[in-house]
Amino acid sequence: MQPRPPDPVPTAPEDEGVYTSLAELIDLRHRARETPLFVTPPRRSPLVGLHHSRLRGRGVDFDQVRIYQPGDDVRTIDWRVTARTQEPHTKLFHEERERPIFILVEQSHRLFFGSANLFKSVLAARAAGLIGWAALANNDRVGGLVFSERDHHEIRPRRDKHSQLRLLDRLVAANRALGAGLADPADCFAQAARRAREVLRPGSLAVVLCDVRALTDAAKRQLHLLGRHVDLLLLPVSDPLDHALPAAGLLRFAQGRGRLELDSHDHNLRLAYKQQAQARTARWERLASQLGVPLLPLDTHTDLIEQLRLHLGLQGGARR
């Protein structure tokens, strides 16, 4: 008997955009059809190459043997059956549609921040939930890895909603744990990518949802190794303040006992900050180009559905 998922806990009004809830992530199943990630996209979509290669299946499965007909590929002739029956027979195959979709989603303290509509941690959680429902609707197996500085929780891909609900439950628990003190600044993204290499079979699709600042040298190496065996979809998450500092005067930051003051009226300071952000963006773009995989950056300023539809080259944006 499958364990009954916990009852959805609504998000309190004061937590809106700061924390997510199971009810919110479950409700995203009704909007999965608005972002057809796992069906053939428009020709200008960044997913075109991925869809035409392996996104719709990991290969072909043997179906049956029938008598050879003119026009059949001679390479598919079944010589054993032909020899036994003394009549040419050919093998038929069908496309293998089901594939494991493994969602790596970060819920670390560096994501527990937002200056626009919501925190980056909530955006990553919503994107993971939406992608999981879309994969299930396409008859794919869904699992994933929810990771932070403290620990990680792994859900094996399965083709049923129980696996998706387990992933969402773990995601909500990790999201709700954010803000409770400081965590060890370990390279949790590189560790998560390494774990994905250990558990994923060739032909899987690894969907990566992490902070835009998470691409360390170690993480980049692990993604290169992971990309040799599985397909990748990269969705770095950012906030407008990750890209530029506003000219807002003296800004004070605090983390634990650490304190920092910045004079945002300093033009050189804002320029250096912007250049660092541009370097991060270029680093992700180079990685995606080297691996030949889609890059779909997300930000907290724009509606999630609208961003994904724009990446897919769909018109109309989000449904309000």
Image: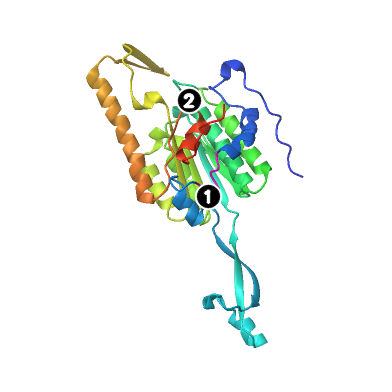
Rendered residue at 57%/20% (across/down): 16
Rendering coords of residue 157 (x, y %): 60, 48
In the depicted view, which residue is nearer to us: 227 or 282? 282
Q: Which residue is mark 2?
A: 112
Rendering coords of residue 52 (x, y %): 48, 55
In the depicted view, which residue is nearer to us: 232 or 43? 43
- Above or below residue 86? Residue 256 is above
Rendered residue at 53%/35% (across/down): 127
The boundaries of the magenta stretch are 35-41
| Disc marking residue 109 | none
Rendering coords of residue 80 (x, y %): 61, 82
Amino acid type indicated by mark 2: Phe
Rendered residue at 48%/25% (across/down): 112
Q: Quadrant of the C terminus?
A: top right
For this orientation, the residue located farthest to the left is 268
Neighbourhood count class around disc 2 (C-alpha, 10 Å): few under 14, some 14–19, many 20 upward: some
| Disc marking residue 40 | 1
